[in-house]
Image (tube, helix red, strand yellow):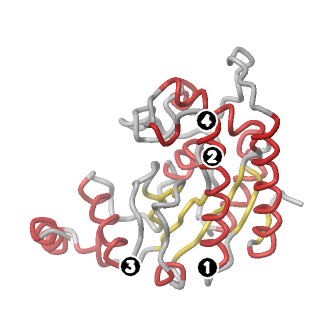
Amino acid sequence: MRLSTLGAVARTCVTDPRALLAPKRYVFLLSHMRSYSTLLAHILGSHPEIAGHFERLAAYAGWPDLVRARFTEAQSGTPSSYRYLLDKLLHNEYRLDGSILDRDDVRLVVFLRRPADALPSMVRLTRMTPLGDRFEGLPRLTEYYRARMDGIIADASHASHRPIYFDAEAIVDTPDALLAELSTWLELSAPLSPEYQVFDDTGERFRGDVSPRITQGRIVKKSRSEAPVEVPPDLLAEAEKAYRQARERILEVCEPILAS
């Protein structure tokens, strides 16, 4: 941390010690782009016991990064009464170090979306908001998807506390059953609701989903009016193979819910 940041952290410790010093747990959503991760993060982040609703775009190399995340949350005005701090990790450059994965206060939620739907959704995302050359075109998006499968497996395989896994489609297809399972797993005092808060930055660039659906405050299924995107068979086959292999391995190291 920079000296200026350290000074601000010290002041926060004095003015609101619970914000940085009170025991908390950390829940990380491990997935990939266009997996309904923004929707799930909004649902979780709307619960009074959970703070955070977007991807912080940061790696976690050690405990100082957990402090940094808590400090950022405190700076945004979030009350310090929450039990869980949430982040979602969708890119391999933002990984969890072994020292984080070994912690007893860290929980991992893993979910994958089938490439036949995820890849076209990624293309539509790049049409709505430019993501840079790295994600330009289906070949590069397919490579991102394949590589991300490997990254998710690596983190999930080394977690000391067994992660949970579900198919991403459950978020919109069977939300009541999924949220009931998550509420129990997180030991929340009140169940999660499929209706969620629309935050000030909901729908903004670099805050996840930028489509109008995310601003509805409720689960909205895929629109039939969305322009179709054709994925070349060779790319789809490559992505499907990566998905199947990753899902098989993840089911070995995770506790599956609503998945067989």
Q: Is residue 16 left or right of residue 241?
A: left
On the image, numbered disc 1 is attached to which residue? 159
Residue 257: percent from left, percent from top: 79, 62
* Camera-nearest label, 4 or 3: 4
What whole-number distance in Å separates the C-alpha atoms at marks 3 and 1?
Answer: 14 Å
Badge 1 amino acid: Ala
Q: Residue at x 71, y 24 (%)?
A: 229
Earlier-in-chain disc, 4 versus 2: 4
Badge 3 amino acid: Gly
What whole-number distance in Å separates the C-alpha atoms at marks 4 and 3?
Answer: 31 Å
Earlier-in-chain disc, 4 versus 3: 3
Estimate how packed mark 2 is, as few (under 14), some (14 to 19) or many (20 or more) residues with alpha carbons within 10 Å: some
On the image, numbered disc 2 is attached to which residue? 193
On the image, numbered disc 4 is attached to which residue? 122
The image shows residue 20, relative to residue 34, as above or below, that is: below
On the image, numbered disc 3 is attached to which residue? 62
Badge 4 amino acid: Met
Q: Residue furthest right?
A: 260
What whole-number distance in Å separates the C-alpha atoms at marks 4 and 2?
Answer: 27 Å
| The one of 201 and 46 positioned closer to us in this rendering | 201
* Camera-nearest label, 4 or 1: 4
The image shows residue 139, relative to residue 216, as above or below, that is: below
Residue 212: percent from left, percent from top: 53, 24
What whole-number distance in Å separates the C-alpha atoms at marks 1 and 2?
Answer: 28 Å
Q: Residue at x 52, y 60 (%)?
A: 92
Estimate how packed mark 1 is, as few (under 14), some (14 to 19) or many (20 or more) residues with alpha carbons within 10 Å: many
Residue 189: percent from left, percent from top: 59, 64
Badge 2 amino acid: Ser
Q: Residue at x 78, y 51 (%)?
A: 177
Earlier-in-chain disc, 3 versus 2: 3
* Camera-nearest label, 4 or 2: 4
